[in-house]
Image: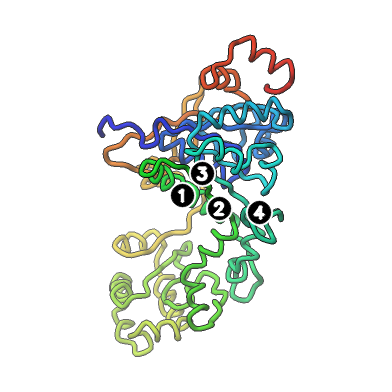
Amino acid sequence: MTDRPPPLQGIRVLDFSRIIAGPLCTQQLADLGADVIKVEHPVTGDEMRTRSSRGDRRGAAFLAFNRSKRSIAMDLGVPAGQDLARRLAATSDVVVENFRPGVMDRLGLGPAALRAALPRLIYVSISAYGASGAFAARPGLDPILQAESGMMAMTGPIDGGPTRHPLSLIDTLTAANATSAICAALLGRNQHGQGDFIDLCLLDTAVGALSNVALQYLTDGRLPERSGNRHVVGAPIDLFDTATEPIYLAMATDRLFADLCRAIERPDLIDDERFTAPSGRTRHRDALKEELERTLRERPAAEWLARMQHLPAGGVRTVDQALQAPEVLARDMVRHIPEGDHELRVLGTPFKFADTELAEFRPPPRLGQHTDEVLSSVLGLASGEIEQLHRDGVVV
């Protein structure tokens, strides 16, 4: 490891976002070295804080998306709070917000107002349906977009109904899109000196994530079938029973299928005329599954997986098993953050650089934990001015 600083060191992000997509994006920026100042409502804070039984209002839903940030709690509903926000924006490179379109405009903090005064500012708006269009003002959350985008219609048991994914996949993908767009805009600013307005929405992310399924429909009009644990056009790709617990196999190519047959000592299946071609394996997938499971049920899952280390095969882990898996721990995907006399366990970052340090993880902030620090160090306010803002209820 070299002494190269984190790639976004020196970049300041003013974060007005709440819930998942925006906060996850700004957490990723913090991992990359940005100074993220999280602006929160002085009473409720980020709505994720209320989903906690912890006394410090930092339950799992908040801890997951807000490490390494500084929290300033101030009232944007009053002119003094709006003025502080504008002054903070003037010290920032990036503003991220995910209010409904129009809310920030009414506060005097919208993209037109801030970018007119601050042409180098990169302003990011994250919403359900985008900053313009007939649905712009309509609220929408991840599961709604799973339903409306077509994702839910293709998810679930073959003979069952539409099923939502329990994780907020669209929020997570939107966060990744936002991080990519911000890094691209920062690179562009280095070239031409100007900021930009980035309009990201869950709808666009959800539709974009349809990828090859959408192209299947656009090219030949075919709609995807609900396939359960199977793959629509490949086999064997499914969950298979063993003598103990099920395992998942994904071996649809000729080479992988042949390697699987040899691994389970069923070379006869390679030359079975039903299974010699990918199309035949898909057409006869039920018969193929029956043949494979007849053998797989003879031995425990652990033994089969040991034989298939060179193949795409895996056990179905619970969350605790996944987080304790050696390969997960080896990649630093469970981290320990010291805080006082104890540690917080959080997920690691997927960013891995060979020659660049990432930012040190810091505990997710308590509501308003850094209010005075930010007002003093960033805006240069004197202690008397800060005390007056507290007395006036502008900040906490």
Farthest residue toward the top?
384
- Indicate left or right for 2 with 187 as reference: left
The crowding category of the residue bearing disc 1, from other C-alpha atoms within 10 Å (few below 14, some 14 to 19, many at least 20), is some
Residue carrying label 3: 25
Q: Mark 1 or mark 3: which is in front?
A: 1
Q: Amino acid at mark 1?
A: Ala
Q: Earlier in the sequence, mark 4 or mark 1?
A: 4
Q: Nearer the viewer, residue 393 or 143?
A: 393
Residue carrying label 2: 200
Residue 214 location, x and y as percent? 51, 72
- Label 2–label 3 contact, CB within 8 A: no
Q: Mark 4 or mark 1: which is in front?
A: 1
Image: 36 above or below 305: above
Quadrant in the rendering for residue 252: bottom left
Residue carrying label 4: 141
The color scheme shown is rainbow
Q: Nearer the viewer, residue 20 or 320?
A: 20
Q: CA distance from mark 1 to mark 3?
A: 10 Å
The crowding category of the residue bearing disc 2, from other C-alpha atoms within 10 Å (few below 14, some 14 to 19, many at least 20), is many
Q: Earlier in the sequence, mark 2 or mark 3?
A: 3
Farthest residue toward the front?
116
Q: CA distance from mark 4 to mark 2?
A: 14 Å
Give the quadrant of the N terminus: top left
Q: CA distance from mark 4 to mark 1?
A: 21 Å
Q: CA distance from mark 1 to mark 2?
A: 9 Å
Q: Mark 4 or mark 2: which is in front?
A: 2
The crowding category of the residue bearing disc 4, from other C-alpha atoms within 10 Å (few below 14, some 14 to 19, many at least 20), is some
- Label 1–label 2 contact, CB within 8 A: yes
Q: Amino acid at mark 4?
A: Leu
Q: Earlier in the sequence, mark 1 or mark 2?
A: 1
Disc 2 element: strand
Q: Amino acid at mark 2?
A: Leu
